[in-house]
Image: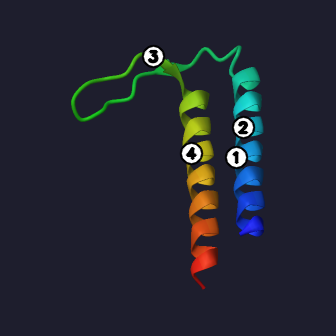
Amino acid sequence: MLFSVKKIFFTITFNFSLFLLLMVGIQNSSNKTKINLIINETVNLPVSFIVGMSFITGSLTGGILSSNFHNKK
């Protein structure tokens, strides 16, 4: 139990630090685009923000899911 709490805490901390680096890194980004959703479009967002948030979301989801499956074995 303690191992899974440590792993989740590490995953959240690591991804939060990546998010902070992403925010600093996109300050001078000028390439902006819209994301086409099924119903509507989003506002103009920097391409680096879209790619970075996709990576961070996948990393966070994978880290949390792997800690849940680790306890099942």
Q: Position of residue 5 (x, y in %)?
A: 72, 59
Tag in front: 3 or 1 = 1
Q: Residue furthest bottom?
A: 73
- Alpha-carbon distance for marks 3 and 4? 20 Å
Q: Position of residue 36 (x, y in %)?
A: 32, 30
Q: Which mark is residue 30?
A: none
Mark found first going from the N terminus, 4 or 2: 2
Q: Secondary structure at mark 1?
A: helix
Q: Are marks 1 and 2 in contact (CB under 8 Å)?
A: yes
Identity, as a three-letter code, of the amino acid under mark 1: Ile
Residue at mark 4: 57
Q: Residues within 10 Å of mark 4 (few under 14, many from 20)?
A: few
x 56%, y 45%: residue: 57
Looking at the rendered image, the quarter that the N terminus falls into is bottom right
Q: Is residue 61 above or below residue 67?
A: above
Label count reads 4
Residue at mark 1: 12
Q: Residue furthest left?
A: 39
Q: Residues within 10 Å of mark 2 (few under 14, many from 20)?
A: some
Mark found first going from the N terminus, 4 or 1: 1
Q: Is residue 45 left or right of residue 1?
A: left
Residue at mark 3: 44
Q: Position of residue 67 (x, y in %)?
A: 64, 67
- Alpha-carbon distance for marks 4 and 2? 11 Å
Mark found first going from the N terminus, 2 or 3: 2
x 31%, y 23%: residue: 41
Q: Residues within 10 Å of mark 3 (few under 14, many from 20)?
A: few
Mark found first going from the N terminus, 3 or 1: 1
Tag in front: 2 or 3 = 2
